[in-house]
């Protein structure tokens, strides 16, 4: 299996953060979302999007940034429409590579930054997988110029129908991230691998939450794009460690700005 690779992109993270609205977690709404309410949401197994959306495998390529972004987009559309839609991971990756590094005229399968994928989702969206099927073999990918010429009105129009209207940075506060995921704002990010601070980089998707009775705390259920390891758990400590000085990038889709809860309600 090739190395899992996403580059650090602090400049891209800063650039994107400047164009995204801030998230407020201390609103004074009367109907606060409490820890017990979030536990009830988490207990509804049928609501877990990982039980519904397609589990993809990218372990034969370095396309994890696009796979993480695609899963986030698919989960958000599942929340909004109840439909399971598969979006083109390879198209998203190649568009991200146009932003990140395509100077050689050919697309090299050497990873793509998280902010580059996020910008594609915001500006262009992503077409359905059927319009640009996934192929992990980079030897068969088009040249940069051929890819640009192949962007037909049908593909671009379809992509725009699935554009991320809003995205916001992931908060350093674990409780804020938990609440946002439970209320319909999945996220994708880059972390060290082995998780959370190993020597290589990998992109995954914060898809759902679960209450862990042993920890007496919530955990995040992470969607992963590796066969036989399609999901894993992220604890509070792992999240805080991964987010500390994170220069890979971490972004929620949609951006539920008024969260209607106070983080300290979630802590025992």
Image: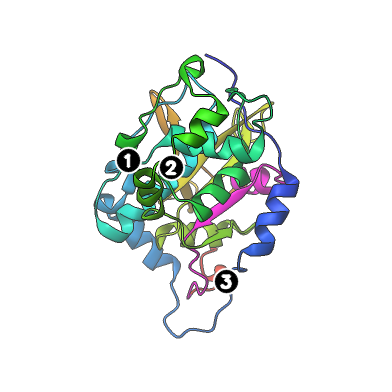
Q: Residues within 10 Å of mark 3 (few under 14, many from 20)?
A: many
Point out the tag, 1 or 3, that comes first from the N-terminus: 3
Q: Secondary structure at mark 2?
A: helix
Q: Which mark is residue 70?
A: 2
In reply to whether residue 40 is colored magenta, the answer given is no
Is 251 above or below relative to 70? below
- Numbered label tally: 3
Q: Residues within 10 Å of mark 2 (few under 14, many from 20)?
A: many
Please state which of residues 44 and 204 is positioned toward the viewer in this rendering: 204
Labelled pair 1, 2 in contact (Cβ < 8 Å): yes
Residue drawn at the location 50% of the way across and 28% of the way down: 146
Image position of 202 (left or right of 162): right
Point out the tag, 2 or 3, that comes first from the N-terminus: 3
Residue drawn at the location 50% of the way across and 14% of the way down: 139
Q: How is the image coloured?
A: rainbow
Q: Secondary structure at mark 3?
A: loop
Image position of 39 (left or right of 119): left
Inter-mark Cα distance, 1 to 3: 32 Å
Residue drawn at the location 44% of the way across and 47% of the way down: 72
Image position of 55 (left or right of 262): left
Q: Is residue 233 visible?
A: no
Q: Position of residue 156 (x, y in %)?
A: 41, 47
Q: Is residue 133 visible?
A: yes
Span colored in magenta: 238-260
Residue tagged by mark 1?
Answer: 86
Residue tagged by mark 3?
Answer: 25
Inter-mark Cα distance, 1 to 2: 8 Å
Q: Secondary structure at mark 1?
A: loop
Labelled pair 1, 3 in contact (Cβ < 8 Å): no
Q: Position of residue 222 (x, y in %)?
A: 46, 41
């Amino acid at each position: 299996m090739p190395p899992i690779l996403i580059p650090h992109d602090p400049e891209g993270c800063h650039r994107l953060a400047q164009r995204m609205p801030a998230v407020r977690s201390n609103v004074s709404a009367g109907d606060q979302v409490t820890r017990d309410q979030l536990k009830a949401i988490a207990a509804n197994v049928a609501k877990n999007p990982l039980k519904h959306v397609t589990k993809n495998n990218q372990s034969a390529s370095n396309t994890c940034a696009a796979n993480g972004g695609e899963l986030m987009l698919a989960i958000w559309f599942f929340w909004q429409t109840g439909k399971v839609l598969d979006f083109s991971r390879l198209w998203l990756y190649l568009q991200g590579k146009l932003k990140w590094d395509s100077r050689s005229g050919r697309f090299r399968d050497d990873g793509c930054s998280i902010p580059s994928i996020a910008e594609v989702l915001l500006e262009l969206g992503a077409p359905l997988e059927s319009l640009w099927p996934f192929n992990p073999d980079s030897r068969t990918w088009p040249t940069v110029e051929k890819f640009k010429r192949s962007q037909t009105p049908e593909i671009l129009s379809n992509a725009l129908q699935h554009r991320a209207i809003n995205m916001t940075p992931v908060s350093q506060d674990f409780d804020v991230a938990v609440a946002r995921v439970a209320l319909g704002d999945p996220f994708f990010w880059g972390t060290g691998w082995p998780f959370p601070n190993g020597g290589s980089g990998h992109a995954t998707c914060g898809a759902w939450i679960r209450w862990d009775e042993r920890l007496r705390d919530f955990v995040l259920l992470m969607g992963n794009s590796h066969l036989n390891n399609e999901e894993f758990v992220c604890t509070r400590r792992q999240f805080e460690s991964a987010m500390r000085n994170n220069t890979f990038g971490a972004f929620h889709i949609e951006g539920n700005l008024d969260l209607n809860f106070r983080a300290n309600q979630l802590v025992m």
